Image: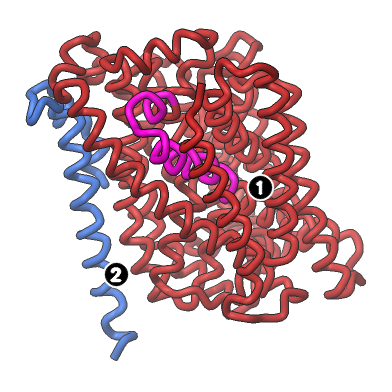
Chain colours: A blue, B red
Amino acid sequence: MTLSLMVPLYNDSTEFYGIPYFYWFQIVLLASSTGFYLAYSFIIDKPQVK
Amino acid sequence: MISTELIISFVSLFVLFIILGFWAKNWRKGDLNNVSEWALAGRKLGTTVIFFLIGADLYSAYTFVAIPSGVFVKGSLYFFAIPYVIITFGIATVTMPKFWTISREKGYVTASDFVKDRFGSRTLSILVAITGIVAVLPYIALQIVGMQSVLTVMLAGTSNAQMVSEIALIVSFVVLAAFTFTSGLRGATLTGIFKDILIWITVIAIIVVVPLSVGGFGVAFSNLNSNYVTLPDTLIPGYTTLAFGSAIALYLYPHAINGVLSSESAHKLRKSTALLPLYGIGLAILAMMGILVYSVPSAMELLSGFPEGSRGILVVPSLILSTMPGWFAGVALLGIFIGGLVPAAIMAIAQANLLTRNIIKEIRPSLSPYSEIRVTKWASTIFKFVALAFVFSVPASYSISLQLLGGIIIVQILPAVLFGMYVKWLHKVSLILGLVAGCVSGILIVEFVNNFGSPTNSLLGTPVGPIYVALIALAINLTIVFVGSTIAKKQNKTKEK
């Protein structure tokens, strides 16, 4: 979450498949945030599931 | 002129949508004369269904129309929608299961129910309800603008286009009102899943077809100014505050709370919320269409036939119409059309709950459960048509502007709703004063920023750069809440001594 607000870190025009870093970095971050949130939800719910 | 295949696929899928909406009353059967059954689908929706429902609820015309429009007109600034999605679902994954647990225990249907019980204040509860109703109204209007954009592009070049478009919208809303009345949230949920399937098919098709047809993303970006490639340094504070301010506001909207409370368990809600950023990938793709469209001559030619001020909201429908075969364009355009219709239904249900439970019932506590559900169903119908009348009477750009105001207003209930779950010593009078001060200051600052004209800008210029007005107003609100609550706490201690 914090990383997504640190704009100077990814505000760059270097291209990857024609897409500037500014855009694809955020899309990668978006996809990986799902993994983090899912992991969090499994960790939190583990005791309740037992 | 639109093709026959387009009309056939659009209309036949819309008929299927209607059938699904009415049939939904038989799905997971329950007593639809009970508010909890009608408005929250009996609070028994599982992980997958909640994922689709909240997805359908939150990824609305704002996603398909307003964000691509913003990127088209202003460039990378409007890509703030991506960090916004990352942050909002992070916050929601942590906080909303707690809100669900409290609400399930006490039988709350709205955030105002929670506020009334938590702080013992009818005034605060009513103010939270009014804030929710007012903030959602322009949001529904925005959904209608999204639907209008589809019809505008489809009917371009035909005679009586405006009249046909208005009739189509009225018919759609009559149908929507009828199946929401009979099926409640069940209707919105099933049609929401249908809408999500169409949207995902569309997004996948767009990301394959459009970049290929323009020779790749590189070609599209090389033709544009630098503010479309990266974010100008001067706009970084605006970008981060827009993302953060919008993120903390999203789950305060009554329709989001409605989706949360319809979950079967906190565990299932947490899991589905954690998965919701996946929808953001679709949002990112659609947002980038605001850039790619510049490299599609046929789409730009289509757009040039419309007034400059309204071209932004027509970007996605124009791209679909210019790059897809007729039958598929019908599928995709219907996805966007009902992508406005379904959220509008859930928003109106949530507004009606607030009006009946937290305003009318406060004035007439003797309201029977039967009268309560009747009033709620009718209020939900009326709210839809109020929004429709609003769209017919003011220009589309006003609806989008007012939606910005809606976001600034709704975030002012954050101290009462979100902090109310975690901070025990907040004082009700401070919360009331903070809420009023936040709303009034937010509206006044936006008016000031826009020279007391149409509110098209929600960023206030400051020495550190532009800042989203919602956060400035919230800072005023929070200062009053915490200073007032600290004083009240000290006074209570003195009295106890």
Q: Residues within 10 Å of mark 1 (few under 14, many from 20)?
A: many
**Which amino acid lies under the numbered mark 2 shown in the image of this protein?**
Ser
- Total numbered labels placed on residues in the image: 2
The magenta span reads B318-342
CB atoms of marks 2 and 1 within 8 Å: no
**Which amino acid lies under the numbered mark 1 shown in the image of this protein?**
Gly
The answer to which quarter of the image holds residue B443 is top right
Q: Residues within 10 Å of mark 2 (few under 14, many from 20)?
A: many
User: Could you tell me which residue is drawn at 16 percent across and 37 percent down?
Assistant: A25
Task: From the top left corner, tell me how far across and down residue B267 is, in percent.
Answer: 38, 76
Up the image or down, B140 lies above or below A33; here it is: above
The CA distance from mark 2 to mark 1 is 29 Å
Instruction: Please check the rendered image and state whether residue B105 is part of the magenta-colored stretch, yes or no.
Output: no
Q: Secondary structure at mark 1?
A: helix
Chain letter for mark 1: B
User: Could you tell me which residue is drawn at 79 percent across and 61 percent down?
Assistant: B376
Residue nearest the viewer, comparing B195 with B54: B195
The answer to which quarter of the image holds residue B444 is top right
Task: From the top left corner, tell me how far across and down residue B238 is, in percent.
Answer: 37, 24
